[in-house]
Amino acid sequence: MKYKGLDIISLRDLDRDFLDFLLAKTKEVKEGKWQNSCKGMVVASLFFEPSTRTKLSFDTAIALTGASMIGFSSAGTSSTAKGESLSDTIKTVDQYADIIVMRHSIEGAARRAAEVAQAPIINAGDGANQHPTQTFLDLFTIHELKGGIEKLKIGLMGDLRFGRMIHSLAMALSYYNVELYLISPSILQLPSYYLDYLDSKNIKYHIVEDFVEVGKELDVLYCTRIQRERFADPVEYEKVAGCYEISSKNIDSLSKDTIILHPLPRVNEINPEVDNDPRAKYFYQAKNGVYTRAALLGIVAGNIS
Amino acid sequence: MKEIYKVYRIENGTVIDHLPGGSALKVLKIIGTNSKDFIAIGMNLDSSKLGKKDLIKYENKVLAKDETDKLALLAPGATINIIKDSKVVEKRKISIPKVLKNLIKCKNPNCICNKEEMETEFYLVDENKKQYRCKYCEREYLITDDFIL
């Protein structure tokens, strides 16, 4: 009951106790406990911005909890198209729903919604800002496959500068005693204020440009997409892109126990020939999103304790 | 003392002195004119420290600490004297506020506070750098004059 009614907006608002609790309860949900934790409740799923993966994952999670679902899957089918403010849409939906899940292209939309709604808000992504449930499922997958998070050596690879998932994950991992390998081209390195943040949490990190150099060290390699449009010169992109594609040619520079994760969708960064390698866990990771979100719904509903 | 009398002398209230020359109107906008009593403004007075300075006097109104702390962004070197029976009873220092409510705007055009009719809110991250984080989009900024609403 401790977390009943809690808004899930940003990693900044949460602490280690909450993350540990969520990880433990997600495990129980995955084992079949807490079925129908939201039976009789109504969950609103408001996707002002289209999304395939996150929406379907939440839809499945809502079904697992036994709740009824209302909502829309794009702003075009909501009254936003008629010029209604976000606050008014949320205040209205708040009259119908017990929990509101929302994705919006505008940063801070979920925080604003939480100010005007009585029902707990779960942020399913707000522009380039936060996507906390992705981070929860990433943490759960690491915890589950590695038997814990403490003392792991974790590589974060790809666009560390602009990738919101990387920022949230780095922030969440800083609650645990991990060692980070920040693997990216120099122009896409983690912003200095995140490095300052890691320093303030006494998290040891290494800045690396090619994962092959450190592959044997890693317990986890978390990949994200490098976007071509981030490079002013396409030649520069071609030069560095190869270093960030995992394929049969370089996968053995990882140790036999390194797990490979990716928030998906992928483009070129993991060659499909790697999919059948036992270390490739990204689709398994996506499945864990359903359990994590089902656990989260039950927790904020006050029915999983 | 001659300089003081250039701007009406008050017996009770608040004197904000040593504002940079030309900044008084901006300061008034920030602190507000929420007083039924006399408010005197002096602009471009000679100052040995600043060359030119502005000052503002609020008669019969003791500004609260959180009101005068708003000056930290615009005029951190200002002095604030609280006057009672024509005597200075408090020389107040300006502290940089931990929270700025509806005082500055967010520079992120995709932040909700620039899309809806609502107040802005920022939290202090680094006092020395005057770095604040937007409550909504969570971007951090080094605050300068042009952030002020």
Image (cartoon, rainbow, N blue to C red):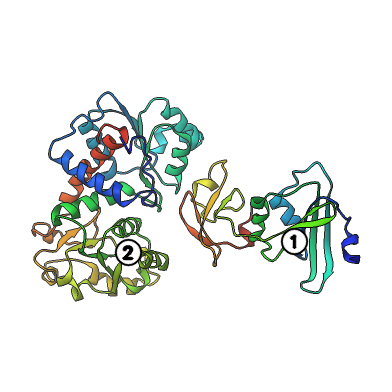
- Badge 2 amino acid: Asp
Q: Where in the figure is residue A111, as x and y percent of width and height?
A: 44, 43
Tell me: A78 left or right of A214: right
Q: Where in the figure is residue B26, as x and y percent of width and height?
A: 72, 56
Question: Quick one: quadrant of the N terminus of chain A?
Answer: top left
- Badge 1 amino acid: Ser
Chain letter for mark 1, please.
B
Chain letter for mark 2, please.
A
Q: CA distance from mark 1 to mark 2?
A: 44 Å
Q: Where in the figure is residue A48, as x and y percent of width and height?
A: 40, 40
Q: Label 1: which residue?
A: B23
Q: In the structure shown, which secondary structural element does the residue marked by tag 1 occupy?
A: loop
Disc number placed over residue A68 in the picture, else none: none
Tell me: A226 left or right of A288: right
Q: In the structure shown, which secondary structural element does the residue marked by tag 2 occupy?
A: loop
Q: Label 2: which residue?
A: A159
Q: Residue at x 35, y 49 (%)?
A: A14
Q: Residue at x 22, y 36 (%)?
A: A60
